[in-house]
Image: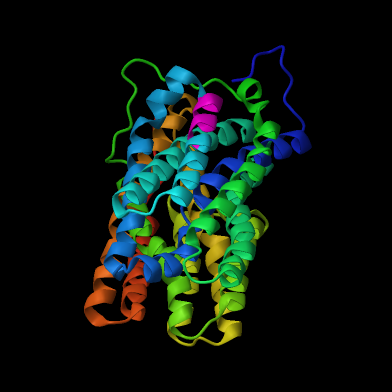
Amino acid sequence: MLTAERSVPSFGRTALTILGLAMAPAIGLGIGRFAYALVLPDMRASLHWSYAEAGFMNTVNAAGYLIGALVAAPMAARLGLMRTLLLGSFGVLASLFASALWETFFLLCVARLLAGAGAALAFVAGGSLAAGLSLHHGGRGSFLLSLFYVGPGIGIASSGAMTPLLIERLGPGSWQMAWGALTLLGLVLATGLILGRQAAGGAPPSQPQKGDRIALGPPGFVLASYFLFGIGYIAYMTFMIAWLQERGGGPGMQAAFWVLIGVGGVISPFAWSWVYNQFTGGRPVMVLLLITMTGSVLPLFSSHALLLAISALLFGSSFFAVVAGTTAFVRKNYPQRLWPRGIGVMTITFSVGQTFGPVLVGLITDFFGGLSLGLGLSAACLALAALLAALQQDLKISS
């Protein structure tokens, strides 16, 4: 809790602070993870990768994310939430720069591993800070919390507006230059973290007590749902640009599609934050998963530009709203000192799922010769995830 002598920051100041913190997932996820899909087609052609090898790169990234999620809560307890966020963010920037320098498969895997670990550290620490900052604003707290999750949308939109057109201009084999440009973009976004520095002093302290732990049984349905979400969403975010290329979509269409996903992420709080207060238990997550599934399955019916635009906006606005929904579940059902651990457990479960997703879809694509079947499997995972989330009840846990 805030000390008695420290006043609660205004709604506007809190919103600005959380938006500053949101630059951490903008760098770690919007660029560090998802911009790989923009560079992947040129990397795959230049380095002669199979789809399984291309998917394995994001599997390694997800494994790094899992490692980061495992150590995030104890690291935050030792270093503090803000220092952990900064360490993770600048680790991602280092990995982006390394990707611009290295060419061998092994070293690029190392860079992807580092990017994943750094993104998880920043995400868990930043999510905990945002949850604390939003706590004292009543019914508007859910909206404030969801502002943290616009960060990936900002990273997706800004990288999407730049990368496909840059690769087209520079020509085949220019993927390293693209990674260099993405590093510079990440540095620009990192200046926004200055706005979030006040969170180190303005957020409530988060110190677990001896013997505190997160039992996996009570939130079991939402954890299982989040695991399947990790499998399902990552296929869309890894392979949709390659899918567009398969169907003749040029750099302009690729850029527009990716920007629309990012725009969807930015408008997400305005579109879906009401869901967190409207439903109980895992039902907010269920609703958002159904929207995400709808967005992911639309391209399988037609590659018409309007349908692709609707798909990008629906998917972009809802898939990080799902993540915000699990954070809201933790905030509602656990005492504040357990938020980093609760968010960490959710992130670990999610990470295990997204570790399997890319390579699984890649193997299916290599075997059957097309991306549509793999993308359809990912949509089925999202539908099952929604069903499991609907079964989750609110918890009865003492503070």
Q: Nearer the viewer, residue 357 or 31?
A: 31
Residue 100 picture location, percent across and down: 48, 51
Q: Is residue 212 left or right of residue 2?
A: left
Q: Is residue 103 left or right of residue 274?
A: left
* Boundaries of the magenta span: 81-88
Q: Is residue 197 left or right of residue 213?
A: right
Query: Which colour assignment does the render follow?
Result: rainbow
> Quadrant location of residue 308?
bottom right
Q: Nearer the viewer, residue 302 or 184?
A: 184
Which residue shows up at 58% across the image and 22% down it? Answer: 204
Q: Relative to 36, does residue 134 appear above or below in the rendering?
A: above
Which residue shows up at 34% across the image and 22% down it? Answer: 212
Residue 325 picture location, percent across and down: 50, 50
> Quadrant location of residue 137?
top right
Is residue 394 in sight in this rendering? no
For the N terminus, give its image quadrant. Answer: top right
122 in magenta: no
Q: Relative to 36, does residue 24 appear above or below in the rendering?
A: above
Which residue shows up at 32% across the image and 27% down it? Answer: 213
Q: Relative to 33, does residue 261 appear above or below in the rendering?
A: below
Q: Main secondary structure of the magenta part?
A: helix
Residue 280 picture location, percent across and down: 48, 50
For the C terminus, give its image quadrant. Answer: top left
Q: Is residue 189 left or right of residue 395?
A: right
Q: Relative to 293, does residue 302 appear above or below in the rendering?
A: below
Is residue 243 in sight in this rendering? yes
Which residue shows up at 33% across the image and 34% down it? Answer: 70
